[in-house]
Each structure stands twice: as C-alpha cells, then as structure tokens.
C-alpha cells in the first residue's frame, strides 16, 4: 500500500467532535433515531416542507461551524503532510459554507491548503456512496488505492471500502466495534495517523531515516550473545566474537553515486567503518551491479579500481558477484569489508563517558564537496564556479581525502579514544545524532568551532545547501578522555592531520545541545531527513 494523498472527513475528524448537537437537530427536524439526516430530508415532499428542513439544517450547521475548534493534532498533521508534499482533501456531508466558516477557527490552515474540498453541495451522492471519494481522487490525480480516507463515522469507512481506498477509523476515544471491524486501521487520535503515514508514504531518497531504522531493529530483536556490537542506530559495523580474544568486525555498504570513482569509494567507505572500531581492515567482498548497455571494458575498469584501492589500504578482495541488470540505472557497488581486532582493542560507542571531549578531523563535507564538483559541474559553472575551484574540489577526494584510517589508527593506539564515528550520509548533523544514540549520551556542540573548508563553503553557498547536512566521509568524530584531549590533538597534528575540539559529552540520554558565540548562547541544531546531496539528485 502506497499513500500519495489523504482525504479527511470534516466534523469530528478535523474538528473536535460534538460541535453539532445531533439529538437537538433530529428533534427539530422530526427525524427518527437511526435515520441519516440528509436522506431523511431528501425523502420529504419537494417544496416548502423540504426547504424548511434544509433551512433548519443550515442554521444548526452555521452555529456548529462558529463554535467548532480544530481537533487535537489536526493542524500538526496537516502541516506534516504539507511538508512531505502529500496531497490533502476534505470530503464531508456538510455544506461548503459551514466547512469554510469552521476553517476560519483554524490558526495555521487555510482552504487553499487543500487540493480539493467536496461537500453535499457537489453533484454526487453523499457518503456512504463512494462517488465523492472517486471524484476527489480524480481531482487530486491519485488512484483511489493510493488515497487514504480518514473519518470518524461508519459512512466514511463504508465509502472508502466501496471506492477501493484504504481507510482509517478515528475513534476519538469512543470506538464503535462495527466500524472498527470494517476499517483497515483504527486510531484513537489524529497523532497516530502520522505514524501510519510514515510507513506508507514514499520515503525520501537516501538511507532509511534513523528513527524508523531504530524502530525496525528493535522489532526484529537481533541481539545475540556473540554480537559484541549488534545492529543499532549509529552503529555502522558489527563486531562478532570468534572465541578467545579475537573479534571479527564486519561492514556492508552500497555506493550509488560518483561512478567515476566508484571502486575507490567502495573500498574506503567500508575500511573507514572497520577502522573506527579499532580494527584493521583486511578483506573485501563486492557485488557489482551494472545497467543494461554496459560494456565489458566498464566492468573491467571498476574491478581494477577496486583491486588498486584495496591493495593501497592493505585489504584483499576475496570474492563477490557481478551482474548486468535493469534493476539499476547506473553502476552500483555493494561492498562488504571485514577486519580483525583483539577484544581489548575493540572501541565501542557505548564506552563514551560524561566529560569526554569530541574531536573532529579535517573539515566537514569533504566527500560531499568532491561529489558536487564531479556530479554537478555544469550547474556550478552556471552559478559562477570557476574551473580552478572545481578542480580543487574534485581533488579533495584524495587530499584531504575521504579515508579516516590514519587518524582512526592514531586514536586507537593512543588509548585516549572512548568512541569513534565517521561522518557519512546526512553530514555532521546526522553523525552527531547517531553518535549520541549509539553512545547513550547527550552531546554539546559548539557551532563556531566546526571547521568548514573554503571550497566547501563556496559550493554550498552557490547551491543553497547546508554543509552540516552534506555527506562527509573523510571527517572522523572522536570521543576522547577529557584529560588527554590535548595529547591526542598534538599526535594528530604531528601526523599532518588537522583536528579540533568541537564539543563534549553530557549526561545519559540522547540529543544534541548546540551553542554559538563567545557567550555560548543556545543555537538551533539542524535535522536532515535526507542528505543534502540526495536532495540535489532529486532535482537533477
């Protein structure tokens, strides 16, 4: 099931239930209990009697609309859908006039926020007939099967089922068993609809959002006794006890961009995640997927690039798979790296302690800067980037480089590192969130200390993207014992590796506290649902 739009009932769904006094309305109309009001009115003799009944209904709806208020969570849900570019509509048995009047009581929602608003004034049979849902789907440009119908009454669910649309029954805390049985989903509050939509709306390009990943891993329960570092948010490699003192560290990652250097990326990205665990990268397996019309020379070139990069990083290719398939549109390399370390030398993020200092090597978004220059040269030239700048940015792949093996080895051998995490997709902002989650500690970061190389700053300014959210292999986060921070910084700099202290580890918990300026004023810390690079690729 893939949801591309949401169609809401209005009274009792987007508005608080109870604004319209149905018992009093029925009494005023003489409508018997259990008989739908609209159908009762339409069954009256045409002329004065039916007109009088319609006038009574209009007056009740007018007073109800004036007194109505947004349902709990309604405006937050509508805002979320707008930000996710999910189309929204209203289908109601109310008059259009009463709907528009009630929307005046919403703070941040306007009629123009809805792709379609359909009422009983429109020329189709009202719910439970499916006609309105089919009409709404057509106007929204969505198949009924991709339109989620949300309502608080049996007619909403019956109409949705008849139209072939998935349905959500909103109980507002007072469920009707018959309606719940017919609905695809039942929720007590609108806030729960957002959780459903996160599962059934299209995901953004890039890696799975961390909160979803954490939920799925918890559901699957992958913890085992021999897994020293099991799957988890912020854990990019697994550590398996082999018996005795030896630990096997494993990493798997796909490379889906920078096809001109895809072999080099596949090796270095995998080796980085092995090294941050304190292990030595030793072996590599790779699955090579190429699109149709790939020639043999391209396959050979990628294999040679893998071999050369592996040899340069002390690794050996020991197997894999190669395939031409229409499942991909450009080359994809899925590399699995492996390394070994003594149990005492394994660096685990859970060993971070309050007071540890957070070091960052090089500058942020080194990898992203190189990719931008390689993948978007024409756009950057159009925006004013010169060839000299683009050449320098491309060269950043190797200088300062996207490998963190040297700094990871220095930190591991120093005995000062309590945790390490390389900055990858989602940039420094996401990497710090992951480090916090994996280490179980809150982090404080000083925004003014974060190093941004001039080339990175310039390209990000031209493309209007935030370097904090740009993919950043080549930068290593190191949690270092507080009293030995200067010692480790001196060792890194003596080896020609730029590094600085950008923050510190706080108490048990999870999250980022950002400060800026000399006085340490509270600052916003950005969150990125997808990498800034992925956002650019969607526009490409």
Image (cartoon, helix red, strand yellow):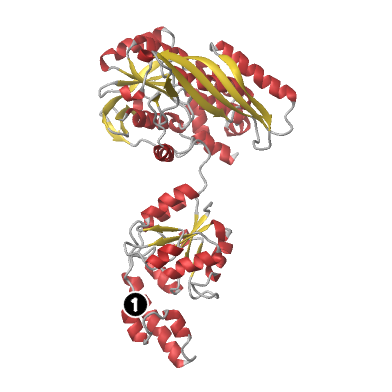
- In the depicted view, which residue is nearer to us: 90 or 12? 12
Seen from the viewer's position, the closer of residues 67 and 23 is 23
Determine whether 394 is above or below 218 in the image. Answer: above
User: Would you name the residue on which mark 1 appears?
Assistant: 22
Q: Is residue 277 visible?
A: yes
Q: Is residue 243 above or below residue 12?
A: above
Question: Could you tell me residue 489's position as x and y percent?
Answer: 35, 13
Q: Is residue 115 left or right of residue 242?
A: right
Classify residue 27 as left or right of residue 45.
left
Q: Is residue 170 left or right of residue 335?
A: left
Could you say where residue 343 lies in the image, as x and y percent from the top left? 37, 15
The answer to whether residue 448 is left or right of residue 197 is left
Can the viewer see residue 10 in this picture? no
Examine the image and state in which quarter residue 498 appears. top left
Q: Quadrant for residue 348, please give it.
A: top left
Residue 231: name its quadrant. Answer: top left
- Comparing 177 with 275, the one in front is 177
Label 1 neighbour load within 10 Å: few <14, some 14-19, many 20+: few
Instruction: Determine whether 198 is above or below 222 in the image.
Output: below
Q: Which quarter shows the C terminus?
A: top right
Q: Secondary structure at mark 1?
A: helix
How many numbered tags mark residues here?
1
Q: Residue at the location (50% across, 49% down)? A: 201
Give the residue at the far top of this rendering.
494
Place of residue 119 in the rendered image (x, y in percent of width and height, measured from the top left): 48, 72
């Amino acid at each position: 099931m893939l949801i591309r739009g949401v169609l809401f009932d209005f009274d009792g769904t987007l508005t608080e239930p109870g604004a319209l006094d149905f018992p009093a309305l029925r009494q005023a109309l003489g409508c018997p209990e259990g008989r739908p009001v609209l159908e009762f009115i339409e069954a009256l003799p045409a002329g004065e009697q039916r007109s009088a009944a319609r006038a009574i209904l209009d007056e009740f709806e007018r007073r109800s609309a004036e007194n109505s208020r947004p349902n709990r969570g309604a405006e937050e849900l509508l805002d979320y859908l707008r930000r996710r570019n999910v189309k929204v509509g209203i289908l109601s048995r109310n008059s259009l006039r009463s709907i528009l009047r009630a929307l005046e009581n919403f703070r941040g929602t306007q009629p123009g926020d809805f792709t379609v608003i359909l009422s009983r004034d429109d020329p189709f049979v009202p719910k439970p007939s499916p006609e309105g849902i089919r009409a709404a789907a057509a106007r929204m440009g969505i198949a009924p099967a991709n339109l989620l119908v949300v309502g608080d009454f049996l007619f909403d669910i019956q109409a949705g089922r008849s139209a072939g649309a998935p349905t959500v029954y909103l109980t507002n805390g007072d469920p009707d068993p018959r309606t719940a049985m017919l609905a695809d989903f039942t929720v007590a509050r609108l806030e729960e609809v957002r959780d459903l939509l996160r599962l059934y709306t299209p995901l953004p390009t890039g890696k799975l959002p961390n909160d979803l990943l954490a939920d799925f891993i918890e559901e699957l329960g992958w913890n085992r006794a021999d897994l020293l570092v099991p799957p988890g948010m912020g854990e990019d490699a697994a550590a398996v006890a082999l018996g005795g003192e030896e630990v096997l560290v494993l990493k798997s990652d796909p490379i889906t961009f920078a096809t001109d250097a895809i072999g080099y990326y596949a090796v270095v990205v995998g080796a980085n995640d092995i090294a941050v665990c304190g292990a030595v990268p030793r072996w590599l397996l790779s699955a090579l997927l190429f699109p149709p019309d790939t020639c043999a020379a391209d396959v050979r070139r990628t294999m040679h690039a893998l071999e050369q990069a592996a040899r340069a990083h002390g690794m050996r290719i020991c197997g894999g798979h190669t395939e031409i398939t229409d499942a991909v549109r450009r080359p994809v390399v899925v590399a699995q790296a492996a390394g070994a370390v003594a149990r005492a030398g394994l660096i685990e993020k859970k060993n971070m302690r309050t007071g540890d200092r957070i070091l960052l090597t090089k500058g942020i978004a080194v990898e992203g800067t190189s990719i931008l220059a390689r993948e978007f040269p024409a756009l950057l030239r159009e925006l004013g980037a010169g060839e000299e700048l683009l050449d320098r940015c491309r060269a950043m792949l190797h200088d300062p480089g996207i490998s963190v093996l040297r700094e990871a080895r220095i930190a591991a051998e120093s005995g000062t590192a309590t945790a390490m995490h390389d900055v990858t997709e989602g940039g420094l902002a996401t990497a710090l969130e992951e480090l916090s989650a994996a280490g179980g500690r809150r982090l404080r970061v000083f925004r003014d200390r974060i190093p941004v190389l001039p080339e990175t700053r310039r390209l990000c300014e031209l493309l209007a993207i935030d370097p904090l959210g740009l993919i950043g292999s080549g930068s290593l986060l190191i949690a270092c014992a507080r009293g030995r921070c200067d010692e480790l910084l001196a060792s890194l700099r003596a080896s020609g590796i730029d590094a600085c202290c950008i923050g510190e580890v706080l108490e048990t918990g999870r999250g980022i506290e950002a400060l800026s300026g000399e006085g340490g004023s509270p600052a916003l810390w950005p969150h990125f649902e997808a990498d800034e690079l992925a956002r650019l690729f969607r526009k490409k």
